Amino acid sequence: MQFTAQQLSGGGRFSHRCRIGNWSEDEFLEEVRLKDFLKRKQEGRLYVTAKQQRLQRCLAATEPSFSPDGLLYFGSAVMIVNEETSAFMACDPYDDPSGASNKESNVYTVTTSPHNQPVARNTFIITRVDETDGYPGEVLHFGQHFRLQTHPSLTGWSLYLHSEPVSPLSASKFARKQEVLFTPNPSGNTKWKLVHPDMRVRFEMEGEPVAANSAVVIKHVASNTALASVRTAQENEFGREYEVHCHTYLSAQRTHSCMAELKGKVTGDIDTRPQDERNVWSLLMETPSPDMLSTQQQQPPPPHPVDQHTAELEAAPQTTTQPPPPEPQQPEAKPDEATAQQQQEGAGAAPAPPAEQF
């Protein structure tokens, strides 16, 4: 096998068209590389093609649900935005952090993304945990348990927001707080509830319906810790995004809670310090404008179809069939005396010849 001086020194080689050195093997190797490239391109196994397919699937356009009365309902598609980072919660179904032995397979990363358009990876479905939980209707209430499920167009199966207490082998990637993931197995660690962000009215708002697009705190039921997002950037295929974990962040200001407990105003299980913005979220839906809502509240409810039909029959004018009015009789013209005499003579004998005049 012969090589040129440039090839032996590690420099650029001649192409196979130049019959110098190992040109025959170079020509055959290029043919093999071309055939392998065309095969992987046809099967969609190229890195560029695979990445394009992943982005196309995750960034498929979706549409949040519409709430006619401005309340959150089970089965609604919502977007969840954090007040601290001003970013939207998103799932990366192609980032599997199950490298540790204690994690189950098919778990996926949760982040907050600055992308504010509704797409498959940042739109979630509110599902009910128990139909017999004591709350009437399909409206979501404060304190009611629910699950957050990924949009059906993201993956071929359902993924649920999951969290578990911190352990030596389970913690968030950067902040080392309670880890938050998406898992396909619904369990006790996938239950969440909403509480009011204002500590002064949190107890009174328990059991009340939750308004869409309002500030709430999302708490993990099993660990009683709040969902949070911090400005710790991490890079992925979608750009720079922020970490999501569970940790209750409270304000450091004094609230004299010990004095309030001494006086009997509060108890030890009532939070008195304000909630930090890292724990405050908003569940966004399409809602009517305030003017339209006020108009709907002022308008009476629509009548029942049977009552509406009866009212229409009563309001209709009563039409009766009446004979047409008689035609006015025209007065007969009175004939003069000559015409009457001629009519009498015509009705009787022939008229006598006129008398001769002498």
Image (cartoon, rainbow, N blue to C red):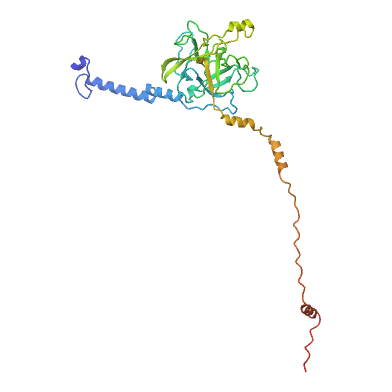
Between residues 103 and 73, which one lies in front from this camera angle? 73
205 is higher (above) or lower (below) than 301: above
Q: Position of residue 216 (x, y in %)?
A: 55, 18
Q: Relative to residue 29, is residue 194 drawn left or right?
A: right
Task: Pick the quarter of the image with the C terminus.
Answer: bottom right
The residue under the point 57% across, 20% down is 127
Q: Quadrant of residue 54?
A: top left
Q: Is residue 291 visible?
A: yes
Q: Quadrant of residue 96?
A: top left
Task: Pick the quarter of the image with the N terminus.
Answer: top left
Q: How many marks overall? A: 0
Between residues 36 and 245, which one lies in front from this camera angle? 245
Q: Position of residue 246 (x, y in %)?
A: 51, 12
Name the residue furthest right: 348
The residue under the point 38% across, 21% down is 47
Name the residue furthest bottom: 358
Q: Relative to residue 144, is residue 109 drawn left or right?
A: left
3 is higher (above) or lower (below) than 119: above
Q: Position of residue 312 (x, y in %)?
A: 70, 41
Between residues 280 and 125, which one lies in front from this camera angle? 280
Q: Is residue 46 visible?
A: no
Q: Position of residue 48 (x, y in %)?
A: 37, 23
Q: Relative to residue 37, is residue 323 drawn left or right?
A: right
Between residues 104 and 293, which one lies in front from this camera angle? 293
